[in-house]
Amino acid sequence: YHSGINAEYGTHPRKLSKSLFQMFAKMKAGMKNAADATQRSAKRADLKLQISNNQSNMDAEKRKFGLAVFGPMEAGDDSEVRALFEATKAKVDEIQAHLDELHAELDALNEHKDHPEEKKEEKKEEKTEDAAAAPAAAE
């Protein structure tokens, strides 16, 4: 005669399978949350890189303007100075608009940081950024 009780675990086989099913369901949900957090973290890193590149591009446009405008300013050619300024301002404004979009997207992703997995990923990002910034600070 079999009582239906699992002698090793002290539970009925159906109860054991149900609890295993629940455990696996929780693990699956946890893995999905971790994968989503990792994906958002990677997207954040990509956005930060794009922001940095765009800021560098904007600075480069301003430097080019300074070099290009020096001669006309020295010669007193106000119309050339104005034309150079307008052309540079249009490029800078375009880059700034793109930067604003990137910052908005980054802010939207940062709203998810309240989740524990997000906090873990953010700490990893900060350590990576600190390690990358250390050689740059030494220069």
Image: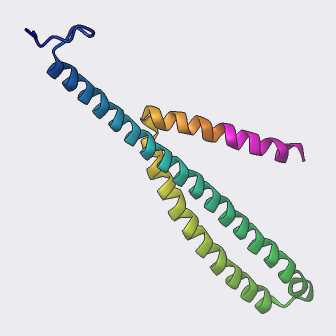
Asked if 63 appears above or below 70 in the picture, the reply is above
Q: Is residue 94 above or below residue 83?
A: above
139 on left or right of 123? right
What is the magenta range?
Answer: 127-139
Q: Is residue 115 shown in magenta?
A: no
Coloration of the structure image:
rainbow
Q: Nearer the viewer, residue 76 or 137?
A: 137
Q: Nearer the viewer, residue 98 or 112?
A: 112
Residue placed at 90% from the left, 48% from the top? Answer: 139
> Is residue 8 rendered to the left or right of residue 55?
left
Q: Is residue 40 left or right of residue 83?
A: left
Residue 52: quarter of image: bottom right
Magenta highlight: main SS? helix
Q: Residue placed farthest to the front in the image?
A: 1
Image point (75%, 45%), residue name: 132
Write the residue at 59% across / 75% down. 94
* Quadrant housing residue 116: top left
The image shows residue 82 at horizontal and vertical percentages of: 74, 86
Identify which residue is drawn at 59% across, 35% down: 123
Q: From the viewer's side, name the closer residue of 15 and 80.
A: 15
Tell me where residue 12 appears, x and y as whole percent: 15, 15
Residue 135 counted in the magenta span: yes
Count every numbered label the image shows and give the total. 0
Residue 50: image x %, image y %?
Answer: 62, 62
x and y, in percent, of residue 21 in the image: 24, 30
Q: Quadrant of the N terminus?
A: top left
Residue 29 in the figure: left or right of residue 71: left
